[in-house]
Image: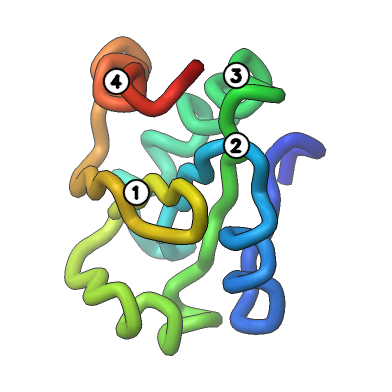
Amino acid sequence: MAANVVTLTTANFDETIRSSNTPVLVDFWAEWCGPCKQIDPVIREIATEKAGALTVAKLNVDDHGDIAMRFNVMSIPTMIVFKNGAEVQRLVGARGKAALLADLAGHLA
């Protein structure tokens, strides 16, 4: 995982989301998910380009299903934007970089 992409687990999820000074984009994914693999490079690019303005994190739903269930993640990839610990936007399905950046624009300073 890239240095600027946070790996979330059940143990660190709440603290990471609550303590971030920037919006947090959480990518809910799984190893077997084709569209998840397709969007992964896009998410990594955004993590690098928006470092300091956006925290990018990934949560493997197979390893941490309790968190996926808590947020009613029914299909993957699902990306949820959190601000001040609260969900503010949900994006379901893979999309290109331009579309994802457009979706996130309202949350970036």
- Mark 2 or 4, closer to the camera: 2
Q: Residues within 10 Å of mark 1 (few under 14, many from 20)?
A: many
In the picture of the structure, the residue carrying the numbered disc 1 is: 79
Closer-to-camera residue (97/18): 18
| Gap in angstroms between the C-alphas marked 4 and 1 | 13 Å
- Numbered disc in front, either 1 or 2: 2
Which mark, residue 96? 4
Instruction: Please rate how many residues cluster around mark 4, counting C-alpha atoms within 10 Å: few if below 14, some from 14 to 19, many from 20.
Output: few
Mark in the foreground, 3 or 4: 3
- Residue at the spot of label 2: 22
- Tags 1 and 2 touching, CB below 8 Å: no
Q: In terms of secondary structure, where does tag 2 sit?
A: loop
Q: Which mark is residue 50?
A: 3
Contact check, label 4 and label 1, Cβ < 8 Å: no
Q: Amino acid at mark 4?
A: Gly
Disc 1 to disc 2, how far (Cα)? 16 Å
Q: Amino acid at mark 3?
A: Lys
